[in-house]
Image (cartoon, rainbow, N blue to C red):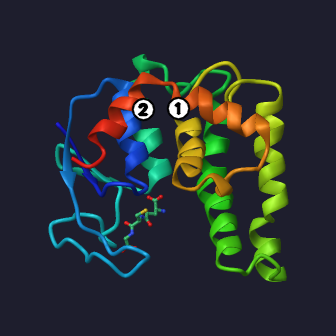
Amino acid sequence: MLTLYHAPLSRSSRIVWLLEELGADYALRITAISRRDGSGSPDPGNPHPDKKVPALVDEKTLITESAAIVLYLTDKFAAAGIGPAVGDMNRAAYLSWLAYYAGVIEPVLNIQFAGLGDDTVLRRAFGDRAAVDHRILEALASAPYLLGDEFSGADILVASMGHFERAMLPADALIDRYLERCNARPALARAWAKDAG
Ligand SMILES: N[C@@H](CCC(=O)N[C@@H](CS)C(=O)NCC(=O)O)C(=O)O
């Protein structure tokens, strides 16, 4: 049995979306977290070492970090075809997007939103917003999804940033159309209906 520790309208919302895409049997455990606006407080029952969400428990195994959870789930439910399996030609691109999301996109966006986008050390370490925007636009200029014709867990990570705040993705009509495609997915409608628990 899978249990997702989830806080509405947070990074765990996209894992609800993924679980719906996968047709997984899962329990949602609505979990309090400290929010940026100062509201909320950590839930002592949350197994995440930092009391964050998402945290996924599969039987007795804990998985944390969005990108790791996405890979774990798309591998576990490989038959759903939401992430290329080991041996698939697109596997390398899939892993690259998941790692790029966690290792570059999230830091760069947070650095920018914190007003530190001009810091040379941070720019050298992670790149800058223009480079991130370029990478996303380049991938979507020639295909409907990041990996090409097939929707994947990488799209869930990237598109969900646009759900959180449209300004987190490039201001380009290409992205508006990409979000429309992703937003039309029935699994996302089901996830939004469940988001608040
Ligand atoms: N890198 C983590 C970030 C998780 C994260 O920061 N989650 C936020 C919700 S969007 C949280 O739980 N914040 C509570 C806190 O900072 O105490 C991931 O992607 O899973």
Q: Quadrant of ligand 1?
A: bottom left
User: CA–CA distance between discs 2 and 1?
Assistant: 6 Å
User: Eyeballing the image, is 12 above or below 140?
Assistant: below
In terms of image quadrants, where is residue 155? top right
Residue at point 69%, 51% (across, down): 169
Number of numbered callouts drawn: 2
Camera-side residue: 87 or 77?
Answer: 77
Quadrant assignment for the N terminus = top left
Horizontal arrangement in the rendering, residue 197 relative to residue 67 (left or right): left
The residue that mark 1 highlights is 183
Camera-side residue: 40 or 100?
Answer: 40
Position of residue 189 measured from the top left corner of the image (x, y, whole percent)? 39, 31
Name the element at disc 2. helix
Badge 1 density bin: few <14, some 14–19, many ≥20, Cα 10 Å:
some
Precedes in sequence: disc 2 or disc 1 = 1
Position of residue 38 measured from the top left corner of the image (x, y, whole percent)? 37, 82
Q: Is mark 1 within 8 Å of ligand 1?
A: no
Q: Is mark 2 within 8 Å of ligand 1?
A: no
| Whether residue 146 is visible | no
Check whether the beta carbons of the residues at disc 2 and disc 1 lie within 8 A of each other. yes
Badge 2 density bin: few <14, some 14–19, many ≥20, Cα 10 Å:
many
Residue at point 69%, 37% (across, down): 176
Position of residue 181 measured from the top left corner of the image (x, y, whole percent)? 60, 26
Amino acid residing under circle 2 = Leu
The residue that mark 2 highlights is 188
Amino acid residing under circle 1 = Asn
